[in-house]
Image (cartoon, rainbow, N blue to C red):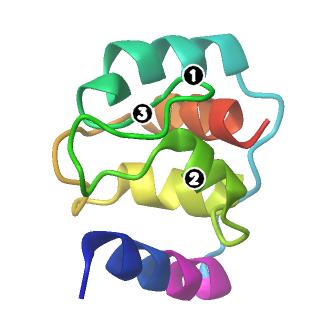
């Protein structure tokens, strides 16, 4: 099963049972900065950028267009131990999630 499919399944399950509060008034600009500085190593983070540097890493546009990829689901995914290369603080995760879902 592909990485993207597993991520979607994980997010749907976690989103259904999670009690994580919704992202509220996060720093979208800080999220964009983190996306460019940290996320761009693996993901296509810019508008119109379809191909990620790592083929299995979904573009931020794809993530934003996927209905189950809500800010809450992204927040859980970013802070989960199975995210392959980075660990974000709760605030950083909320900021990046806010940037992606705007």
**Residue at numbered disc 2:** 62
- Residue 23: which disc? none
First in residue order: circle 2 vs circle 1: 1
Viewer-nearest of discs 3 and 1: 3
Mark 3 crowd level (few <14, some 14–19, many ≥20, 10 Å Cα): many
Q: Residue extending furthest left?
A: 85
- Front tag of 2 and 1: 2
Graded by Cα atoms within 10 Å as few (under 14), some (14 to 19) or many (20 or more), the crowding at tag 2 reads: some
- Going 70% across and 56% down the picture, which residue do you hit? 65
Q: Residue under circle 1?
A: 31
Left or right, 34 with respect to 61, comes to left
- Neighbourhood count class around disc 1 (C-alpha, 10 Å): few under 14, some 14–19, many 20 upward: many
Marks 2/1: CA distance?
A: 17 Å
Report the magenta stretch's main SS: helix
**Image quarter (top left, top right, bottom left or bottom right) of the C terminus:** top right
Image mark count: 3
* The image quarter in which residue 28 lies: top right
- Residue 42 is situated, as x and y percent measured from the top left of the image, at 25, 36
For disc 3, the marked residue is 44
Q: Nearer the viewer, residue 41 or 76?
A: 41
- Whole-percent x and y of residue 31? 57, 22
Above or below: residue 17 compared with residue 51:
below
- CA separation in Å, label 3 and label 2: 9 Å
Question: At 26% from the left edge and 39% from the top edge, which residue is drawn?
Answer: 87
Asked which secondary structure carries label 2, the reply is helix
């Amino acid at each position: 099963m592909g990485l993207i499919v597993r991520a979607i399944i994980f997010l749907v399950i976690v989103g259904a049972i999670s009690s994580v509060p919704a992202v509220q008034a996060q720093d979208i600009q800080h999220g964009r900065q983190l996306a460019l500085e940290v996320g761009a190593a693996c993901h296509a983070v810019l508008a119109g950028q379809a191909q990620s540097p790592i083929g299995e890493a979904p573009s931020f546009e794809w993530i934003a267009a996927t209905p189950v990829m809500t800010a809450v689901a992204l927040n859980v995914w970013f802070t989960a131990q199975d995210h392959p290369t980075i660990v974000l603080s709760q605030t950083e995760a909320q900021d990046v999630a806010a940037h992606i879902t705007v």
